[in-house]
Image (cartoon, rainbow, N blue to C red):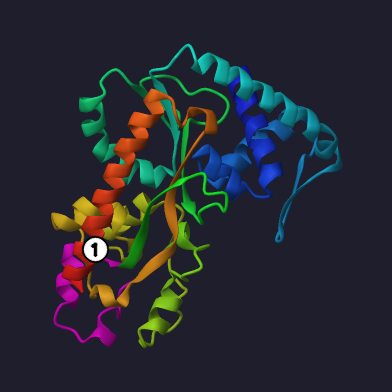
């Protein structure tokens, strides 16, 4: 195994053991849970030792890993400290980790304005960009979840989840009564929202809106919003999805809503941005933080207007 992938596998292993799940580790690394599992499995194959016990109740470290965890944690703490020292020599670099769908659907389309205002700042988002990915924590981590109790983060925006369809399928449902609009259409399920306390699933949507549907839990599941949207645009079904990430596609008619906003639901979780404490006052981080806040405020205003329009 090459050195870079060896270190990435160790990083995935340490985070999975510390957080107690591949999903939580994946969120911190801005990759999929499956990718975390693959990195851990590759390390197990390389070492010839089982490191993680996988079961229905989740994952837990083996005795072999428990003995090594203190050394692993200390090693990555040392890498983090070294990264901080090197950052002082590279003040114009900014490393960002974000859920891939947030990065692709919301952040990337807006980056042109940031680059126009700050052409000297070089960005690395989820390992891709102007500079190569580095080990250690990102300067800015964007997460979808509950805001930490310590308040050391910026709340960007909550989303508003409602049925989303292709324009062709919206037109097909337009003249039908609400109780019949989804008859015959496959339901697509997004795992992105499954842990939100607001219960953002198809069975809960039907229950809230008093509409009967046989086996609403059936249908294809997608880990990535972008994958579900590809299916929607291919007229393969209708998905419950957050409007905030889809803004432009909803505005220009590439996507549509077969039901009014009153049938939707605001997420309890929110997109939040967390900056490394010692970097919150660094000029590069300050500029990005201010820009990110402005873009988030614009999204909040747009969402209020959109929900009112479709409602």
The image quadrant of residue 37 is top right
Query: Is residue 2 something that shows in the picture?
Result: no
For the point 59% across and 20% down, which residue is it?
4
User: Is 169 covered by the magenta stretch?
Assistant: yes
What residue is drawn where x is 33% and y is 21%?
A: 121
- Residue 89's x, y, as percent? 48, 11
Q: Is residue 49 above or below residue 145?
A: above
Q: Residue at x 50, y 54 (%)?
A: 147
Helix, strand or loop under label 1:
helix
Q: In the rendered image, which residue does mark 1 sit on?
A: 304
Local crowd at mark 1 within 10 Å, few (<14), some, or many (≥20)?
Answer: few
In magenta, the rendered stretch is 163-187
Residue lying farthest to the top in this orientation: 89
Say how many tags the image has: 1
Residue 91 percent coordinates (x, y): 42, 17
Residue 198, compared with residue 182, is above or below; it is above
Quarter of the figure with the C terminus: bottom left
Is residue 27 a member of the stretch shown in magenta? no
Query: Taking the image as drawn, is residue 296 in sight?
Result: yes
The vertical placement of 65 against 308, above or below, is above
Residue 218 or residue 259, whichever sits in front: 259
Q: Position of residue 287 (x, y in %)?
A: 33, 30
Q: Position of residue 69 (x, y in %)?
A: 78, 35
Query: Residue visible at 28% across and 56% down?
Result: 300
Which one is in front, 247 or 33?
A: 247
């Amino acid at each position: 195994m090459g050195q870079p992938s060896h270190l990435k596998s160790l990083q995935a292993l340490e985070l999975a053991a510390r957080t107690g799940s591949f999903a939580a580790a994946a969120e911190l690394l801005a990759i999929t849970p499956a990718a975390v599992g693959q990195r851990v499995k590759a390390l197990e194959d390389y070492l010839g030792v089982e490191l993680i016990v996988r079961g229905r109740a989740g994952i837990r470290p083996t005795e072999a890993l428990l003995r090594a965890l203190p050394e692993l944690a200390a090693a990555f703490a040392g890498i983090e400290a070294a990264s901080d020292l090197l950052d002082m020599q590279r003040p114009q670099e900014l490393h960002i980790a974000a859920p891939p769908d947030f990065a692709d659907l919301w952040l990337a389309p807006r980056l042109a304005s940031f680059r126009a205002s700050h052409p000297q700042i070089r960005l690395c988002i989820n390992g891709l960009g102007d500079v190569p990915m580095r080990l250690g924590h990102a300067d800015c981590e964007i997460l979808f979840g509950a805001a930490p109790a310590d308040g050391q983060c910026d709340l960007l925006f909550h989303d508003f989840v409602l049925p989303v369809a292709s324009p062709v399928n919206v037109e097909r449902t337009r003249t039908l009564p609400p109780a019949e609009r989804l008859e015959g259409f496959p339901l697509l399920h997004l795992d992105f929202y499954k842990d939100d306390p607001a219960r953002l699933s198809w069975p809960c949507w039907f229950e809230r809106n008093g509409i009967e549907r046989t086996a609403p839990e059936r249908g294809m599941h997608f880990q990535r919003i972008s994958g579900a949207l590809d299916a929607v645009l291919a007229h393969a079904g209708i998905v419950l999805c957050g409007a905030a990430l889809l803004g432009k596609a909803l505005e220009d008619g590439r996507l549509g809503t077969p039901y009014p906003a009153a049938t939707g639901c605001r997420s309890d979780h929110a997109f939040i941005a967390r900056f490394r404490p010692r970097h919150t006052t660094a000029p590069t981080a300050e500029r990005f933080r201010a820009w990110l806040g402005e873009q988030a405020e614009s999204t909040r205003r747009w969402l209020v207007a959109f929900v009112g329009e479709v409602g």
